[in-house]
Amino acid sequence: MVSITDWDGILDSILPNEDTEIVIRDQFVKPLLEAIGFGTQERRPEFKTGNGSDKVDFAARKNRVGDIFANSQANPYLLVEVKARANKSGAKINLSEGTPQYLDAREQLRRYLLAPNCETAQWGIITNSVHIQLFRRHGKVMVPETACIYIKKDNITDIVSRIRRLIENTPKALTVCVYNNKGGVGKTTTTINLGAALRKQKKKVLLVDFDSQRDLTKSLGLDVGAKSLFDCLTDRNLNVREAIQPFKIKDRAGKEVRIFDVIPSDPKMEKYTDSGEAETIQKGAARLRDLLEVFNYEYDYILIDCPTQWLFFSKSGVYASDVVLIPAKHNGLASLHNAARVIKDFVPEVKKERKDGGPVALPIFFSGEKTTDAQLHTANTEIDAILKQARTEFSFDLQPYFWPRERRGISDRNIFSLPSYATVADAAFAHIPAVFRNSIVAEHYLNLAREYFLYE
């Protein structure tokens, strides 16, 4: 690995207003790639992503027997997008989180990670040798695995060590919290049926009911086992795996088939909802994330259902997640405004506490209502007002979360929608996800999975 002395010299060799990406590539990124384990024959500059003329600055992968990556240029594992420190006019390129240059670079990296020649890539880095951030790709989702870090001589060695440690131990799971600070938007229904749709795609899924009302647990006809998640929250000596209950259904031959695993809600959680007793849990809202970490290499998806109010259980669910999936109602004014609160206030609050770049809010979707053109026009008018208020009063751009397809010069205000079907409600009485009872419902939830998660 490159020594501290070496990094001192490398950082000193780059001019403060360096306006050439080639210098950053040669003097900083090449030593970086070497330090995180990719030799000369294991990396390729100007890698063609397969998306038109797009080229990412570097792609890298460990060599295999008979497969030298620099020669085959196939199946990259890591992509690196490089920026200069300044533009040709001398203005600094600021890659600190939230700046226009940062947002552009992040979106550029995401586009590369989803390009045809990069479908095997699981990691991405953006850097200009002043800032650096590591991202993990899981299906269609790109999530930060580090904060956007300001590089200094006294932290560069730790940064390199951390990046290497992370990319050598890629988690299998994506943890998703289904949340809106408004009830009646279909959080539990979404959690159950999204989990079922992912299972039908051969994904290994764990559902976590972190709501004291226990709707998910009751809908699936389950109960707590010998140990509960609540017990594990309060007693650090317990094994959280003992809280798992398998959910099974009978196939056409009458044989029980394990669909997914569930950690049911415990009735004892209720006393923590309206009292201050949650404050006695060691590490507070961070405790759930610690508990679920043991499953990161066992499941493909961990889906968390939590209550509406922004209290201990909801905050814990968001804190434990890589991404937050936000259902809303096009005809529910409060659900739209509360979705904005989740994105603008609650997720940033947790990001500030976690200090690792996560979690990330996904764009909203409309859940379970029939829509007309007139109703959508009314909803879009209200969304327009929400976006304007966020921009003018808080300097927060909500557009990517409400109208993700809207671009400069392109008007596309389509929001993904799940229609309402009686079979969804009826399924709860049968204790079977609607996805397994109705092929049309199954197709809609598969489309939800494809919209947000599945890379196909």
Image (spheres, rainbow, N blue to C red):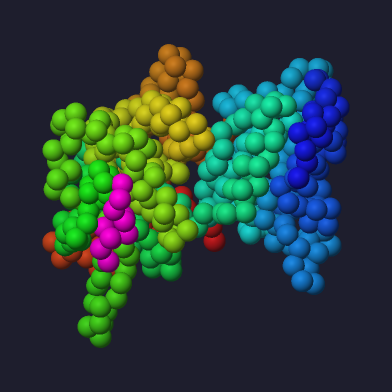
Residue 30 located within the stretch drawn in magenta:
no
Q: Is residue 120 above or below residue 151?
A: below
Tell me where residue 234 sits by quadrant: top left
Residue occupying image coordinates x 37% and y 29%? 346
| Quadrant in which the N terminus appears | top right
Q: Nearer the viewer, residue 370 or 234?
A: 234
- Outermost bottom residue: 253
Residue 348 image position (x, y, % from top left): 43, 28
Residue 21 image position (x, y, % from top left): 82, 33
Q: Nearer the viewer, residue 342 or 54?
A: 342
Q: Which residues are magenta?
A: 236-246
Q: Is residue 84 left or right of residue 450?
A: right
Residue 244 located within the stretch drawn in magenta:
yes
Q: Nearer the viewer, residue 450 or 275?
A: 275
Q: Is residue 135 visible?
A: yes
Q: Nearer the viewer, residue 38 or 1?
A: 1
Q: Is residue 101 above or below residue 166?
A: above
Tell me where residue 401 sits by quadrant: top left
Q: Is residue 416 above or below residue 431?
A: above
Q: Is residue 418 visible?
A: no
Residue occupying image coordinates x 31% and y 56%? 239
Residue occupying image coordinates x 77% and y 38%? 3
Residue 136 image position (x, y, % from top left): 57, 47
Residue 216 image position (x, y, % from top left): 22, 53
Q: Is residue 108 above or below residue 455?
A: above
- Outermost front residue: 237
